[in-house]
Image (spheres, rainbow, N blue to C red):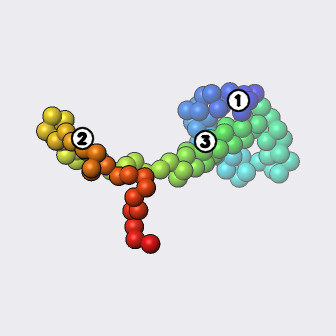
Amino acid sequence: MKTATYYTQHLDEAKLVAGRCKAMTEQKLRTLSMGDYQEWQISNEGVNCQTAQSVAEAALVRELVLKQSKPPAPMATPKVPSPPSSAAPAMRERNDSQKLNTAQTLAPV
């Protein structure tokens, strides 16, 4: 028997086995008696089928959840070339008469 851990590490195989088992399960349901079908379910083949199907379904759900939780990719905006830094005027120093004095009021009271 193969474990869920094995099938998780070999997801392609799990999907392949799950697909094959779906058809096999339907065929077994049609051809076997209920007792024989239940015996098949607990056989190595039946358990492998159930495990592979569970892992494949869980992987599908995980993929869907990850797709839904991923934020959409930001749209690329065209870059506008910025002027060279030498093109920007340098800040001028303020002389003492232009500087604010902490005692001055900024807004009328």
Instruction: Residue 97 in the image: state x and y as whole percent.
Output: 27, 50
Q: In which quarter of the image is the N terminus?
A: top right
Q: Residue at x 79, y 42 (%)?
A: 41
SS label for mark 3: helix
Q: In the image, what residue type sits under mark 3?
A: Ala
Q: Name the residue under label 1.
A: 5
Which residue lies at the image location 60% right of the left edge and 45% below the top edge?
62
Q: Name the residue under label 3.
A: 59
Indicate the amino acid at tag 2.
Glu
Tell whether label 2 touches label 1 (CB within 8 Å). Answer: no
Instruction: Determine whether, in the image, residue 31 is placed left or right of residue 76.
Output: right
Q: How crowded is mark 1: few (under 14 residues within 10 Å), some or many (20 or more)?
A: few
**Distance CA(mark 1)–CA(mark 2):** 70 Å
Left or right: residue 93 versus residue 108 is: left
The answer for how far apart the CA atoms under marks 1 and 3 are is 12 Å
Image quadrant of residue 53?
A: top right
Q: Identify whether 71 is placed above or below 44.
A: below
Question: What residue is shown with label 2?
Answer: 93
- Quadrant of image for the C terminus: bottom left
Mark toward the viewer: 2 or 3: 2
Looking at the picture, does residue 51 appear above or below residue 34?
above
Q: Can residue 23 be seen in this view?
A: no
Q: Marks 3 and 2: in contact by CB < 8 Å?
A: no
Classify 2 as above or below 51: above
- Residue at 86% across / 48% down in the picture? 35
C-alpha gap between disc 2 and disc 3 = 65 Å
Q: Tell me which residue sits at (25%, 44%) in the image.
A: 95
The one of 39 and 90 positioned closer to us in this rendering: 90
Is residue 104 rendered to the left or right of residue 80?
Answer: right
Q: What element carries label 2?
A: loop
